[in-house]
Every structure is written in structure tokens, then in C-alpha cells.
Image (cartoon, grey):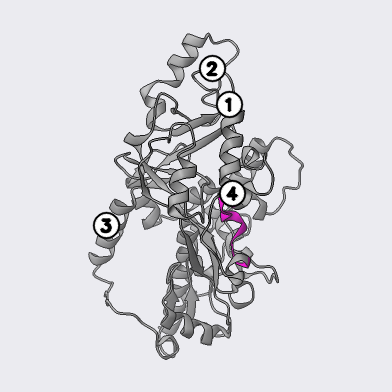
Amino acid sequence: MHAGLLKEELRKLDSLLIKIADETKVPAGQALAVDREVFSKKVTKAIEENSLIEIIHKEVTNIEEIAKEGIVIIATGPLTSDGLIKKIQKITSQDKLYFYDAAAPIVTKNSINFDIAFYGNRYDQEKKKEESIEEWKKRVNNDKLQEQSYINLPMNKEEYENFCKELVNAQVVTLHEFEKKEIFEGCMPIEVMAKRGLDTLRFGPLKPVGFDDPRTAKRPYALVQLRQDDKQGALYNLVGFQTNLKFGEQKRVFSMIPGLENADFIKYGVMHRNTYINSSVLLDETYNLKSNTNIFFAGQITGVEGYVESISSGLVAAINASQKFKQKLGFKDTNKITFSEKTMIGALAKYISTENKHFQPMNANFGILPELEEKIKDKKEKYKKLSNISLSYLEKVIN
């Protein structure tokens, strides 16, 4: 729901990337997932067809020289080249510009065993008290629900415990000591979570709450979810299964999950480096570098974690880079445009620009919004109230 609020804010601001994301979305329940190949082609086409944009296909590292006269937005993505890293280190006076997270494996849909697997979104799949078994099965198996659902793989207690046993004892890719310290808590590898206790996964990514197993009409002991990864619905990723296991071990252990015994893994999970700066001391709420106001940063390099969050940072940086450019041309009313911390866009900007000695990348979440004056126990009501406040503040910026 928090990510949904951020997307709605961006839609109201007429974000081109969110518009294209909406055009290329694939079924994923309430989440906004896109066909990445189609999405990237449409974005590339939009840029290439814009007569005001000149595309230069080469690496740029002379940031300071360009910033003497012009305005620079650095949005290098998670795998910044060594050459550009060195330049960013120089202009930010930082030696450390990275953290490590993990990516989940992807399987083909036609290799999933649907004698076990079933479609459904959390809570949509539970049997209601007044329903008969036949009525319930008919409701949850309708085509409309399947088109908007995750694929779910239920596990009984024995299956779950055997899986966890093999998972915690599986071979992992050896990390250096400094790499171990840089793993982002929000993308913790599943094997690391499993080592924290036998029930950790059942209360985390494998929680069965909100589902009934069509085979038994009862809640499963644990449940694995798969989310559509492409427009055609041919590929699905294992939700929450970011991992650092060796590829052979991923095939062996993850195939123990009921329904994936013959799964075709077309992409295995990997650890990768994400580059980010200590924005909490370097940037202001417009993603502007304090030490050189001709330079802005955007994307994951600022410490926002996630695709939509990166879009948010880019929009704020671009709006204010435009203000800065108009200022150089002598226009009036070129003050910086900041977003209220009561909006998700503004709360993210405030988070990354607020000094914090334990600074780590942050996703959009209701926890970074200011607390309500009134205490609301019901989470849905509370989040609805926060969302309404956020959107009302955004309207003031738009108008």
C-alpha cells in the first residue's frame, strides 16, 4: 500500500516512467510489475524521439568540468563503473560508495506443477465461513482472479522443515568480510534469514496467512509465492528468495519446494553491488549536492531503494535542475521546489537528506511519514488517513 501511494503521487505529477510502467504492467496483485524488456524499449523510444534531448553514447567522467558552467544529474544506476565511481568519490570526498543486496531466481511457468500450485492473492484465497467447499473452489479458480494473482506453493510441516534444513546447510558463494557487512537488511538472503530460527521464514516471506490450500481447504503450514516477471506470463520469480547460494545448490534446494520439483530455473539468484553515496550529509531535500549546487543525484545512488522510489528521486531532481537552469537564464520565481514530508515523495527526500550515522537505503513505507495526531489502531484506516493527507498536500504543489 505504501508503494501504491508513491505511484499514485507520481501519476498525479504526470511521471512519464510511471505512465509507461502502467502501459507495460503484468499481473501481480496490487503490486506494479512490468515486462522489463517492453518497458525499457518504450522508455528508450520516448527519449530518442524527444527533440530537446541529445543522446551521447559514451561514458562521462569529467563531472566537475561540466558542472562549472552547466547542470549535472548523476543517475548511474546500481552498477556504476570504476571510472565514474572514482570521480564521484572525489566530488563527495567519500571512500565508501556501495552496499550489497541479492536478487531472486526466476522459473518458467510451464515447469510449475499445478497439481500443487494455485493462483490467489492474500486473503482473497481464504474460505469464508458461509461458503461451501464447492462455492469456495469456484470463486478462487475463476479466470479473472487468476489473471491478477500470484502463484502459490503450499507446504506442510514436514516439507517446510526439510526445506529449511537443506537451506541452512547449503553451500553459498563465499563473501569477503567487508561484503558481509554491506548486505542491506531489506534484501537479506533467504538462507541468512533461515539461520535465524526455524520459524523465521514462516513469519516472513513464507507466511501462510490469508491462504487456504485448495487440496485441503485448510491454511498451509508455510507458503511460497511466485510473481509474474514478464508480459506474457511465461516467467515467475520466487518472492522473497533473494539468495547467495551457489547455482547448483539453488536448483537442488529450491526444487524441494512442492510444485517446483521439475522447475526450469532460467535465472539464478545472485549477489550484486549497488552503489550509493552518504546522502544524509551530502544532499538536500531536492537531491542537490550541498558542496556544488550545479550537481544533483538521482536513483539508487542516493539511497532510495526500489524502482518507483528511484523514479521519485529522479523527478524531484529534474524539477529542481530545471529551476536551477531557469535561474541561470535570469527567470524569476526559480526557488527550489520541495515536497512536504507528509507526502511519500517528500518523506523519501527528507529521509535521504537527514543526517544519520547509520544511514542505509530506504524503501517507501508509512513509517517514514510523520505520525498522525490521532491514534488509529486499525492499520488499514491509519494508512488510508496517511494516504489522504499525502495526496492533499501534493495537490497544493500541483496547484
Residue behind mark 4: 169
Does dot 2 land on a helix, a strand or a loop?
Answer: loop
Measured in 3D between alpha carbons, the distance from the residue under mark 2 to the one under mark 1, in whole angstroms, is 9 Å
Residue 284 part of the magenta segment:
no
Measured in 3D between alpha carbons, the distance from the residue under mark 2 to the one under mark 3, in whole angstroms, is 44 Å
Q: Residue at x 65, y 39 (%)?
A: 203
Q: Earlier in the sequence, mark 1 or mark 3?
A: 3
Q: Quadrant of residue 286?
A: bottom right
Extent of the magenta region: 181-191
Does dot 4 land on a helix, a strand or a loop?
Answer: helix
Does dot 3 land on a helix, a strand or a loop?
Answer: helix
Mark 2 vs mark 4: in front: 4
User: Where in the figure is residue 10, as x and y percent of width and height?
Assistant: 46, 54
The kind of residue on which mark 3 rests is Lys
User: Where in the figure is residue 30, as x and y percent of width and height?
Assistant: 48, 38
The kind of residue on which mark 4 rests is Asn
Residue behind mark 2: 216
Measured in 3D between alpha carbons, the distance from the residue under mark 2 to the one under mark 4, in whole angstroms, is 31 Å
Mark 1 vs mark 3: in front: 1
Residue behind mark 3: 41
User: Where in the figure is residue 301, as x and y percent of width and height?
Assistant: 50, 70
Residue behind mark 1: 220
Near mark 2 (Cα within 10 A), the count class, few <14, some 14-19 or many ≥20, is few
Near mark 3 (Cα within 10 A), the count class, few <14, some 14-19 or many ≥20, is few
Instruction: Assess whether mark 4 and mark 2 are in contact (beta carbons under 8 angstroms).
Output: no
Mark 4 vs mark 1: in front: 4
Measured in 3D between alpha carbons, the distance from the residue under mark 3 to the one under mark 4, in whole angstroms, is 42 Å
Q: Earlier in the sequence, mark 2 or mark 4?
A: 4
